[in-house]
Image (tube, grey):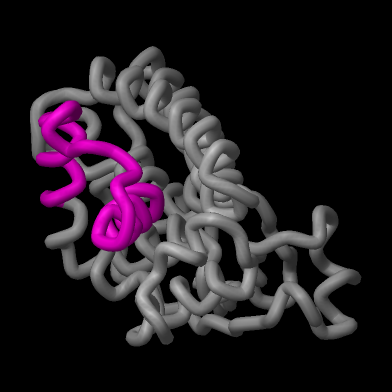
Amino acid sequence: MEHLELVSFKVCPFVQRSVITLRYKNVPFDITHIDLNHPPEWFAAISPFGKVPLLKVGDKAVLFESAVINEYLDEITPAPRLHPEDPLRRAINRAWIEFGSACLADLYMLSVAADEAQFEECRNGLLGKLRRLEAEIHPAPYFNGDKFSLADAAFAPLLMRLELLNQVHCVFDPAECPKLEAWSDALMAMPAVKGSVVHDFVKVYFDHLRGRGGYLASCLPAA
């Protein structure tokens, strides 16, 4: 297998999706963290969108977009495959992975909302998506039922951040979404998920939110 290097920003949930996949499939890799506010010169030359993650595949190619990276990783590594074998179910999973990306976009807008009114507007948009997700997911432990998939890797970063934010401000009531809560509990207990962030992630994440300013930052405990 070619040497794999993942280019990362420490709090990026899309990078975390790929780290989870790499760790779950026991793929050797290196990770390089950059500061997206002050990226190195080489980054712009290899990142078409100026975003992370990027996956350097030896000297052959640089892949971008987490869904593409994760499918590549799944295809080049041994079974079990992390996409359903059934073509229709596989397409459904791909669609909901995109839905997960939209949820992450809502979470980002919520985290940088300037005031409480804007925060509540963003929160309501996210809650609507979480309720739709609650209706779609199978009984625990995973999105498709008993088998971990790329859909689980895609949603774990969102669920981790929701759990952290709920500790400082009510973003959503887990009692409203019992299947979502059980799914989150199962994913947060997995070694591949636990080890998918830097060791001081809570501090780094909250410091990042403080740096953004806005309503949610004012709700965080003092650094």
Give how far across and how far down residue 190 sits, in percent. 16, 62
Q: Is residue 191 above or below residue 131?
A: below
Residue 97 in view in this figure: no
Would you say 162 lies left or right of 31 here?
left
Magenta-drawn stretch contains 130: no
What stretch of residues is rendered in magenta?
157-186
Give how far across and how far down residue 117 sits, in percent. 55, 37
Give how far across and how far down residue 80 sits, in percent. 24, 47
Q: Nearer the viewer, residue 80 or 104?
A: 104
Give how far across and how far down residue 104 sits, in percent. 51, 44
Q: Main secondary structure of the magenta part?
A: helix
Q: Nearer the viewer, residue 177 or 187?
A: 177
Q: Nearer the viewer, residue 221 or 13?
A: 221
Which quadrant is the C terminus positioned in?
bottom left
Q: Nearer the viewer, residue 19 or 73?
A: 19
How many numbered circles are shown? 0
Q: Is residue 101 above or below residue 217?
A: above
Residue at left offset 31%, top offset 21%? 131
Residue at left offset 84%, top offset 56%? 48
Image-quadrant location for residue 152: top left
Would you say 184 lies left or right of 84 here?
left
Image-quadrant location for residue 2: bottom right
Residue 86 in view in this figure: yes
Residue at left offset 73%, top offset 76%? 59
Residue at left offset 17%, top offset 27%? 176
Would you say 20 lies left or right of 181 here?
right
